[in-house]
Image (tube, rainbow, N blue to C red):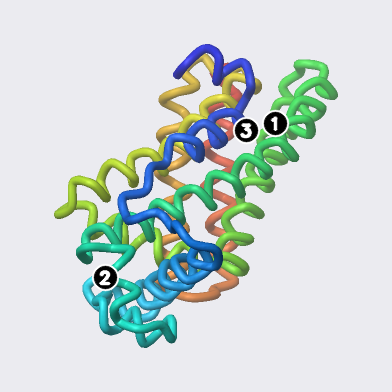
Amino acid sequence: MNPAIAQEGAAGVATAVAQSVQYQGRKPSRQGSEQRRQDILDAAMRIVVRDGVRAVRHRAVAAEAAVPLSATTYYFKDIDDLLTDTFAQYVERSAAFMAKLWANNEGLLREMVAFGDGSVAARSQLADDIARLTADYVQHQLHTRREHLMAEQAFRQEALLNPRLALLVRSHQQILLQGTCHFFQVLGSREPQQDAKVLTAIIGRMEYQGLLNGPEPQAEEEMLGILKRHMHLVLASA
């Protein structure tokens, strides 16, 4: 990770990703045209969430956005540009959301670490508290950002066949991965990068299962148990 970004913390990682996003379609040149372009991107995203990536076509997007067909072809010469910019906007917005989340929680995490006396009991309690925070994050994602997760899954699948989307997916993954790595550094992990990769993989699976199975009370208990085990293993070796 870039040292300058590391110094800024996890929020700096997310901000850097947001600033790195590049759009492919034609830029608005007239007053009011930005809103039309925005309407097209939002319409494409709704179609992705509702019907999947392959349902995104110029005619379908124009109908969804209530704009002339010529408007979609004006801003996006082909479907690849439209899909790329739709996901680019998702990555940009997701990065802004995560930057705020990291900024709000990093201070709390440092307080939790400083509050402990370094004893086995204190580290055990810290592991439980971090696990609970992580479980709350996953539940928040599933309950209030379900459509965002659905879109993310759809684009990740399509990225296996689309190199431009693959680049964006990798950038998007860095938001959570490097932010989590920074948090493990705060916790004193000996292998923060490895621990972050394991935890983000766990979170990704939990989000997918939550989307697939819907609300399940027993799943929430299992989720917390898995996260507690991981955090206890990490902090025991820190």
Q: Earlier in the sequence, mark 3 or mark 2?
A: 3
Check disc 3 and report the residue beneath it: 11
Q: Earlier in the sequence, mark 3 or mark 1?
A: 3
Q: Give the image location of residue 60, x and y in percent.
A: 30, 83
Q: Marks 3 and 1, Cα distance to the nearest angstrom?
A: 27 Å
Task: Residue at 59% x, 71% y: name it.
Answer: 217
Give the side of residue 231 with respect to residue 26, left or right.
right
Q: Residues within 10 Å of mark 3 (few under 14, many from 20)?
A: many
Q: Give the image location of residue 107, x and y in percent.
A: 78, 30
Q: Give the image location of residue 58, x and y in percent.
A: 26, 77
Q: Give the image location of residue 124, x and y in percent.
A: 70, 31
User: Which type of secondary structure does the marked residue at label 3 adopt?
Assistant: helix
Q: Amino acid at mark 2?
A: Thr
Instruction: Report the quarter where the C terminus lies.
Output: top right
Q: Nearer the viewer, residue 171 or 223?
A: 171
The picture quadrant where one finds residue 82 is bottom left
Point out which mark residue 124 bears: 1
